[in-house]
Image: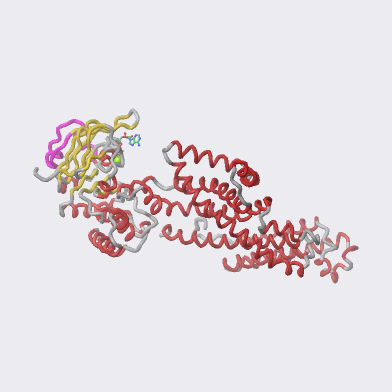
Amino acid sequence: MSAPAIIEAKSVSKWYGQFQALKNINLIVHKGERIVICGPSGSGKSTLIRCFNRLEAHQEGDIVVNGVALHGKMTNVAAVRSNVGMVFQHFNLFPHMTVLMNCMAGPMWVKGVSEKQARKTALKFLERVRIPEQANKFPIQLSGGQQQRVAIARSLCMEPAVMLFDEPTSALDPEMVSEVLETMTGLARDGMTMVCVTHEMGFARAVADRVIFMDAGQIVEEGTPDGFFGHPRHDRTKLFLSQILKH
Amino acid sequence: MLYPDTVEAEILVHKPWFVATMFGVVLLLFMAFNMSSTSFAELMRPVIGEPSVSGFYGRFAIAFAIAVIFTLNVVLIGFAPLKFQIGIVWFELLLLFIAFFETFHLSLPFIREKLPFLISQGVVTTLYVSAISIVIASVIAVAGAVAKLSSNGFAYAIASFYTSFFRGLPLLMQVYLIYLGLPQLGFVINAVPAGILALSLCYGAYMTEIFRSGIQSIDRGQWEASRSMGFGFTLTMRRIILPQALPVIIPPTGNQFISMLKDSSLVSVIGVWELMFLARTLGQKTFQHMEMLISAAIIYWMLSICLELVQSRIERHYHRSKVR
Ligand SMILES: Nc1ncnc2c1ncn2[C@@H]1O[C@H](COP(=O)(O)OP(=O)(O)OP(=O)(O)O)[C@@H](O)[C@H]1O
Ligand SMILES: [Mg+2]
């Protein structure tokens, strides 16, 4: 692929005390690429993507995001983070601010954008996730699916180079999952670079350029959705797929 | 408000067993007192004759009358809407207090003569000593809470030593230590600044703990969301964490403010002419202690009520984002 790399992880290892959560991870995410990471619980998926904006620190190897190397002594971590959007399983909206303010806060406080401009951007992205009419409500007044879409809009307002999703639909009721997935599919279509931890296999098939399977802190297998779902090579992958497809 | 159930409960004060029990308890209680020399007994004279010789019959009649009035009052209030109930109960309790103060036979002219000075000197001093101390204590509290939560050894050690020391010593002793102890080190300090310093340090220590627990009550996810957007520590604290911690912090902090208002009377021991000091000294010459003390008590109470009102206002403001 000729597109520049947005995220480059080389031989990344991470420990929690004695426990090794990531083992020698190598992964390159190119601009415009959509990557889905799946794997059993505790396999290190969250840990890995949280290393990409340094919510977690890795101990070995190199991670370069948008041309900036992440390490303990870096002084410009905020600059990297404002370029990397993150959507959490539990939304983590700021409950004391209105939906609109949730979206305006980042541009205003980090980028120093004027209030007027921030409002315009916020409304644009709330439109994009199709909830502009909720702008003046507080997060708790919204349904789970709506909250997650606000969280996506909040990240988009920073106009990030890459978006990280950590199981964005697994805290949602089934009927709200699709509205969030549709939003994410729309983003993918518009060419956003995305790394998604998710078990939504329909989404992975439709959107992903590559599917990555992790187990016990390692990348066990990666491939195109068709190859990955059609002809999994490793036993652990087969077992995992048979388990999630059973439901 | 507690969680409101939508099933309407029967009104407690209208249940026969409750009314009967209340009546019985009040009757027995007042039978136990000898009320024959009170003004209430005088009112009963047409029924019981000369109160002092009416004996058991007189006692019973008085207690019975009080029990009837009390029970009827409670049952009737039970019919009123909530707002009205609150108002009328406040009003009645207040009347009882006034009746109690009445028994001291206070000299109103004396109060009227001294009150202006009590307010212009005493209240003003109390207010500005408390207000300055509250501001300083709040600043200390934020810094202390952050230090106690930090991973910096020095900051943690200093903050925990500070809270331990100033929560551990009686405030009175801190006042003396600062007023009499600092000059030993070469800092001569006036009474008012010494008082303010002692109050700020003491209350800052308590409030450090309140702020710390408030900050800790906020979900980790808020920090993560905030930091992942590129907000720095100070911004996260000021705009994300503290505003959410405030609803948790405000009620106990309101308590501290009210308590500080009254504890500011301790600085009277180093000769600050605040409200308590004047209340004790103004009546001394003419042995009219009660006049000044009760006036001061009422003033303290009114100041506290003002703080309570401010607190409930702020609480209501922060309640907004919690209701659907
Ligand atoms: N703060 C922590 N301290 C110690 N161990 C941790 C910590 N966070 C995660 N771990 C461990 O690291 C491993 C990987 O965790 P991680 O959250 O990345 O898994 P995951 O693949 O996201 O799982 P899930 O699907 O349940 O979210 C797990 O075994 C977990 O117990
Ligand atoms: Mg996870």
Residue located at (42% from left, 38% from top): B152
**Residue A175 in sight:** no
- Outermost residue on the left side: it is A2
Q: Which residue occupies the foreground of this view, A223 or A159?
A: A159
For this orientation, the residue located farthest to the top is A18
- Magenta segment boundaries in residue numbering: A221-244
x%, y% of residue A162?
21, 48
State the quadrant of the C terminus of chain A. Answer: top left
| Residue B316 in picture, x, y percent from top left | 48, 61
Instruction: Please say if B254 is above or below A62.
Output: below
Residue B105, relative to residue A192: is it above or below?
A: below
Whether B18 is among the magenta residues is no
| Rendered-image quadrant of the N terminus of chain A | top left
Q: Is residue B87 left or right of residue A116?
A: right
Camera-side residue of B281 and B106: B281
- Kindly give the residue lying farthest to the bottom in the view shown: B46
Q: For the view shown, which residue lies furthest in the right direction?
A: B53
Q: Is residue A233 magenta?
A: yes
State the residue at coordinates (25%, 31%): A60
Nearer-the-camera pick, A59 or A173:
A59
Q: Position of residue B206 (x, y in %)?
A: 55, 46
> Is any part of residue B279 visible from this angle?
yes
A108 vs A45, nearest the viewer: A108
Q: Is residue A55 above or below residue B270?
A: above
Query: Quadrant location of ligand 2?
Result: top left
Measured as percent of width and height from the top left, residue A224 is found at: 13, 41
